[in-house]
Image (cartoon, rainbow, N blue to C red):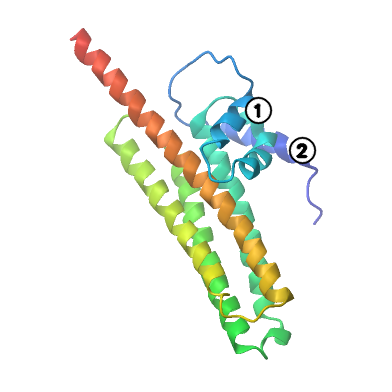
Amino acid sequence: MKSLPSISMHFLIFLFFFLHPIPTLGSTVYDTSPTDYIRTSCSATLYPDICYTSLSGYANPVQQDPARLARIAIGVSLSKARRMASYVSNLTRETAYGADPQASAALHDCFSNMDDAVDEIHGSLRQMRRLVAPGSESFRFQMGNVQTWMSAALTDEETCTDGFEDVREGPLKTEVYERAVEVKKLTSNALALVNSYAEKAVSLSFVNGAKFTELT
C-alpha cells in the first residue's frame, strides 16, 4: 500500500489531535509561532536538530502546548521503532546471516528488545491520551508511568546497539546499528519532552496551589 503524502499525513494527525483533546496547562497568550515554540522546546533535548526536523511538520496541531508536543513526539518515536522492529524481524529470517552465529544472535536479541520498546512506547502513548488534569495525584501517577516506560524503551534500544559490539564489521552491522541509533535519538528526544511537560505541570500546580492558599 502506498504511503500517504506528507501533507495529507500532517492533516490527518491534526484531525486526530483535534478530536482527542488532552489536558493543557491553562490558557496563555504566546508571542512566538508554533514552529518557533517547537524549536525552543527541542533545545532542551539531546538532539535538538533531529527533534525540530521530526516535529516541525506538526506545528499546527501542537501550537504551544507542551503536552501535545510530548504526545506527538512519542507517536513519532513509536512509528520509527515499529519500522525498526519490522526491519530487524525480516533480517532474522534471511538465511545469509545464519552462517555468522554472533550476527544471528545479535539480530534476534535486537528484535526482542525493539519489540519490547514498541510495547513500552505504545503504552506511553495510550497513557498520554488518558491524562487527567495536571496537579492531581492521578496525573502524577500517569506521568510517572510514561516516564518509566519511555526510559525502559530507551534502555531496550540501547541494548540492541550494544549487542552488535562483538559482531564483525560489515554492511549488516553498520546498517542495523545506524538505524537503531536513529530510533534511540527519537526516543531520547520524546522522553526529554515528556520530562519537560511533567516539570511544567508540577510547577504550575504548585503556583496555583500557593495562590489558592493565599486567597484562603
Query: In front: 10, or 57?
Result: 57
Q: Residue furthest top?
A: 215
In-image side of 130 versus 104 (left or right): left
Q: Is residue 216 above or below residue 135?
A: above
Relative side of 9 to 216, left or right: right
Q: Secondary structure at mark 1?
A: helix
Residue at 54% x, 45% y: name it: 46
Q: Secondary structure at mark 2?
A: helix
**Mark closer to the observer (1, 2):** 1
Q: Position of residue 6 (x, y in %)?
A: 77, 41
Please identify the quarter of the rendering in which residue 98 is found. Answer: bottom right
Left or right of 133 in this view: 57: right
Name the residue located 31 percent from the left edge and 38 percent from the top edge.
138
Image quarter of residue 55: top right
The percent position of residue 73, horizontal first and vertical second, equals 57, 42
Q: Is residue 175 above or below residue 106?
A: above
**Percent position of residue 54, x then y:** 66, 43
In this picture, residue 145 sits left or right of residue 31: left
Residue 104: in sight, yes or no? yes
Residue at the spot x=71%, y=82% of the render? 94
Query: How many discs appear?
Result: 2
- In the image, which disc is placed on residue 177? none
Q: Residue at x 78, y 51 (%)?
A: 3
Which amino acid does the dot numbered 1 rest on?
Answer: Thr
Q: On the image, numbered disc 1 is attached to which residue?
A: 35
- Which residue was labeled with disc 2? 8
Residue 148 x %, y %: 38, 52
Q: Nearer the viewer, residue 63 or 14?
A: 63
Between discs 1 and 2, the one toward the N terminus: 2
